[in-house]
Amino acid sequence: MSIKIDGLIHTYNPGSPFETHALKNVTMHVESGEFIGLIGHTGSGKSTLIQHLNGLLKPTSGSIWINEVDITKPGVKLKDIRKKVGLVFQYPEYQLFEETIEKDIAFGPTNLGLKEEEVRQRVKEAMEMVKLSYEELKDRSPFDLSGGQRRRVAIAGVLAMQPDILILDEPTASLDPRGRDEILEQIQLMHQQKKMTVILVSHSMEDIGRLVDRIIVMHQGTIAFGGTPREIFTQTEELEAIGLGVPQITHLMKAMNRKGCQLPEDIFTVEEAKIIIMDYLRGKQNA
């Protein structure tokens, strides 16, 4: 399912002393099945932008098409749009409220008016996707789980709606390294298996670099530039000028070259760097 945004403007508190122009003429296109990384410093407009994509915010002006339907037009049923566009907020576990994990995940599908058996099947499938055992955990309170497990329950609640587009706002915030890796691994697997369109908002350049197909960089309510991870992370000066950085492994490659090595500097994942550095060392040994 594709997304097209044309001339999107959003102003908070218009006409007041607190007027803030959060989005300024944003135009972008996301192809069906793409995995997009959305990056930008705090206040760049990322969260405001994604909240427009399922109608949580109404634009001051501009148009948003979800699979050729302009959701800004009068008469569009936003409930139908929200079935297709799943939005996982930062710290989604704070929105858990039911007494059992099964009831919490079932909340959305139940409100769609689905039959009980269909709801149960969706809950099972969603829990399987985030690597939680239905039989072991369905009757437990979500508040008995670890932070990482609660995060997975919250994500499962969105997945149970079976969206075609999944938007995640800092899904690994405050998780330990293991919990972060597990969540990101599941997101990557869901994208590959379900072929869903995914937009990942993150401050981690390393995570963005190794997961997404394309990066969109936001700055002061506008799209500063975009491209593949390799294209974006070679623009070190441009990123640093707007308060962002490149993955630490990219800095390492540059530092090694300053010491006399001859290594490519458009490297942004640890896995790729391992191969490059090992090949370089083997070459020096055989020289």
Image (cartoon, grey):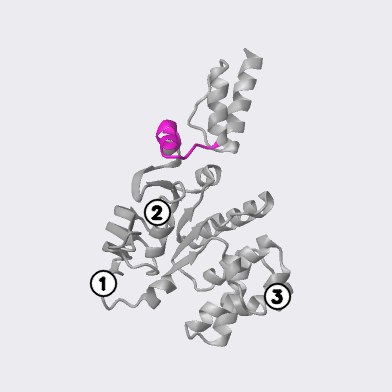
Q: Residue 117, percent across and down?
A: 58, 85
Q: Is residue 195 shown left or right of residue 206?
A: left
* Residue 232 picture quarter: top left
Q: Residue 183 placed where, x, y %? A: 61, 57
- Residue ID at (34%, 60%): 3
Q: Position of residue 105 (x, y in %)?
A: 59, 75
User: Mark 1 or mark 2, which has the lower sequence index?
Assistant: 2
**Residue at mark 2:** 45
Question: Hey, what amino acid is under mark 3?
Answer: Ser
Q: Amino acid at mark 1?
A: Lys
Name the secondary structure under disc 3.
Answer: loop
Say which quarter of the image contains residue 233.
Answer: top left
In what element is the residue under mark 2?
loop
Q: Which residue is under mark 1?
A: 73
| Sequence-wise first label, 1 or 3 | 1
Query: Which residue corresponds to mark 3?
Result: 141
Q: Which residues are magenta?
A: 233-247
**144 drawn magenta:** no
Q: Residue at x 66, y 16 (%)?
A: 285
